[in-house]
Amino acid sequence: MERPRFSLKDAAAACGVSVSTIRRYREGGRFPGAEKVDSGWLIPLEDLLAAGLRVNAPSGPDEQPVSGVSDLSEGERARLLRELADARHAQALAEADARHLRDTVTRQDAHLGDLRRAMLALTAGPASTPEPAQEPALSDAHEHPVSVPEQPRSRWWARGR
């Protein structure tokens, strides 16, 4: 059974490339089994596959203008652009807020770790704590100072006499 052979135009359509691409490949020697016939060139399927082309590849999308964008009025287009700018601004604010919150959490985690270490240092001690040494008993004189009765004060205007 003979494998299919394609003309330049049919090969281009089957591979989803332009006719000039198939022509460049043929002139570059990438289709060694291509034959010249009265109606043009015939390229065997094996040569197309060996050149790295995909036969019956899906063609690119047909170029169609994007519907709706060009049909918008200037006012509608301006409104959509404002909404887009507002959305981008809100996104930037949300990202900045998220960065700030991450920084705050990082600082608080570090502070919490410091507090935990301090708490361990305060609570950790020897397993048995010795009783505090007792100070010698103070005498009554040291506990309650002796009050000296005040002498009556003379008035300042009467001092000079």
Image (spheres, grey):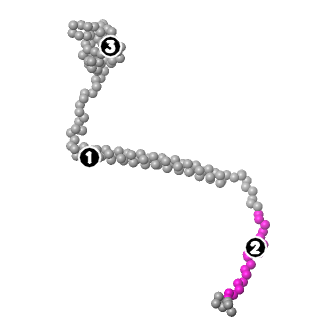
Q: Nearer the viewer, mark 2 or mark 3?
A: 3
- According to the picture, the residue beneath numbered tag 3 turns out to be 28
Label 2: how many Cα within 10 Å (few below 14, some 14–19, many 20+): few
Q: Main secondary structure of the magenta part?
A: loop
- Asked if residue 4 can be seen in this view, the reply is no
- According to the picture, the residue beneath numbered tag 1 turns out to be 79
Mark 3 is on which residue type? Gly
* Residue 153 position within the rendered picture, expressed as x and y whole percent measured from the top left: 68, 87
Question: Where, by quadrant of the figure, is residue 68 drawn?
Answer: top left
Query: Helix, strand, or loop for circle 2?
Result: helix
Label 1: how many Cα within 10 Å (few below 14, some 14–19, many 20+): few
* Residue 89 position within the rendered picture, expressed as x and y whole percent measured from the top left: 36, 47
Q: Earlier in the sequence, mark 3 or mark 1?
A: 3
Q: Earlier in the sequence, mark 2 or mark 3?
A: 3
Q: What's the magenta region?
A: 134-154
Marks 1/2: CA–CA distance: 89 Å
Q: Nearer the viewer, mark 3 or mark 1?
A: 3
Numbered label attached to residue 142? 2
